[in-house]
Image (cartoon, rainbow, N blue to C red):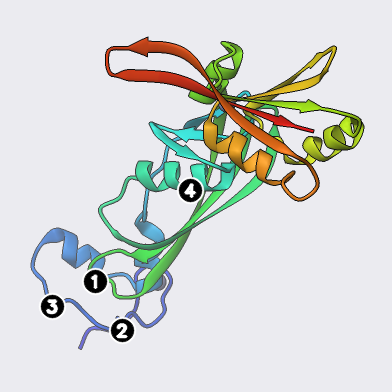
Amino acid sequence: MKPNICIKCGKDKSWSETDTRRGTEASRRMFALCEDCFLQKHELFRLDNISLAVCQCGSHYFSKQEKFDDLENALKSGIEKRIKTRNKISSIKIRIKRHFGHKYQIVVSANGKISPCKKSKTEEKTIIATVKNLTCEDCIKVLGNYHEAKVQLRGKDIAEMIKKAQHILPKTSWVKENPDGYDVFFITKTDAANFVKQFKEKYEIKKSFKIVAQKKDRVLARDVYVIR
Ligand SMILES: [Zn+2]
Ligand SMILES: [Zn+2]
């Protein structure tokens, strides 16, 4: 009887569960190795460097056409989509190892099985993710002064109002000072309504509309609030 040892490491080469496929050159070579040497010899996945984009406002990350609120999720999704493999991957973990400017060194660790071996393998690869800058739709609106709502802060408590506003203003809003107080501009009506809500208990709020355009059956109006 032939000795049942791995030709590479000399250990017993009985596989935990063996595929009975035999005869081909590939399978003969495969069965000459123990499971560990087989797994070591075969690559679980391949992955090239990737690139993402971050908006100048810092609130959105983009991987291909998808939008994310944080870098970690954008990276994870980008990596999962670009991973190249014919094997069954059961989990992928990522870790940011280092970061220089807009380049991130990422350690990608995947776990999976390489057929016909039933034992799973964990493989690590280090890639570079380049994060480019772009201008998101919201930022384009802010840059173009586009707004759907305006909140006017007025009255004797203005200093207190501004102090409160600083903590709750969304990134997609901007403030202008004028002789009567401050005007806060919002790119969406929802953002403005959420902002105003925070002042409801202590101040008087008045809402009105300003028509900015009229097209056939459609009226485009801005929401205008006065808080005092
Ligand atoms: Zn071996
Ligand atoms: Zn932006």
Measuring 13% from the left and 78% from the top, which residue is drawn there?
20
Judged by depth in the image, the label closer to the viewer, 2 or 4, is: 4
According to the image, label 3 marks what residue? 20
Earlier sequence position, callout 3 versus callout 4: 3
According to the image, label 2 marks what residue? 16
**Mark 1 Cβ inside 8 Å of ligand 1:** no
141 left or right of 179 in image: left
**Mark 2 Cβ inside 8 Å of ligand 1:** no
Question: Which of the labelled discs sits on residue 76, or is there none?
Answer: 4
Q: CA distance from mark 2 to mark 3?
A: 12 Å
Label 1 near label 4: C-beta < 8 Å?
no
59 left or right of 217 in image: right
73 left or right of 91 in image: right
Quadrant for ligand 2 reads: top right
* Residue 170 visible in the snapshot: no
Label 3 near label 2: C-beta < 8 Å?
no
Q: CA distance from mark 1 to mark 2?
A: 12 Å
According to the image, label 1 marks what residue? 31
Q: Amino acid at mark 4?
A: Lys
* Residue 228 visible in the snapshot: yes
222 left or right of 120 in image: right
Q: CA distance from mark 4 to mark 1?
A: 36 Å
Query: Residue 2 occupies which quadrant of the picture?
Result: bottom left
x and y percentages locating residue 85 in the rendered image: 30, 50
Determine whether 128 is above or below 178 in the image.
below
